[in-house]
Image: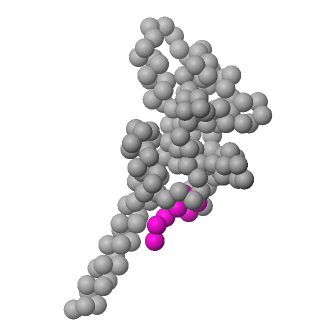
Amino acid sequence: MRRKVADILKEKGPVVYTININERLKDAVKIFNEKRIGALIVVDDKEDIQGIVTERDILRKLGKTEGEIKDMSVKLVMTPKERLIVGTLDDTIEYLMKVMTANQIRHIPIVGGETNTRLKGIISIGDVVKTMISGLNHENKLLKDYIEKSF
């Protein structure tokens, strides 16, 4: 059975950490450290998705600048919504894995609703790997059981 994003979010839960587009990078770093996460969905004052900011985005910006970036706006570092890659609840884990690999990204916001614009969750590469390993372990057990019953 192919696992879908909706299945993973049921297990993981729908908690998604966000940051306002006008906040500073130091605020994003604080949340990354407190929550032990690597990405934040960037929202505006109406809670509409404006993009995503990741640890990697901040490190890349740090590497390109010589000055302090902690007071820099999240807006200047984030991936904007126009370039944001999203998934849906009906996507399979295999599909997300291919998208993440092809685009060299580690987090995909999951959207749903009538217009596929409501934030439903976020899937990380860790979630994908955990699910794939779980599926392989289950398949392995089934094969072992089948072999043992055959002899």
69 sits to left or right of 115: left
Q: In which quarter of the image is residue 52?
A: top right
Residue 137, horizontal then vertical, whole percent: 36, 68
Classify 27 as above or below 118: above
Examine the rendering and report whether any part of residue 37 can be seen: no
Image quarter hosting the C terminus: bottom left
Examine the rendering and report whether any part of residue 134 can be seen: yes
The residue that appears at 47% across and 19% down in the rendered structure is: 61
**How many numbered circles are shown?**
0
The residue that appears at 70% across and 49% down in the rendered structure is: 115
Instruction: Please state which of residues 27 and 49 is positioned toward the viewer in this rendering.
Output: 49
Instruction: Residue lying at the far top in this picture: please name it.
Output: 67
Classify 128 as above or below 33: below
61 sits to left or right of 75: left
Residue 5 in the magenta stretch? The answer is yes
Residue 86, horizontal then vertical, whole percent: 56, 44
Query: Which span of residues is magenta-colored?
Result: 1-7
7 sits to left or right of 96: right
Residue 43 in the magenta stretch? The answer is no
Classify 125 as above or below 92: above
Residue 105, horizontal then vertical, whole percent: 44, 39
Instruction: Residue lying at the far right in this picture: please name it.
Output: 46
The residue that appears at 53% across and 40% down in the rendered structure is: 85
63 sits to left or right of 123: left
Classify 149 as above or below 104: below
- The colour scheme applied to this rendered structure is one colour
The residue that appears at 46% across and 51% down in the rendered structure is: 96
Residue 20, horizontal then vertical, whole percent: 68, 29
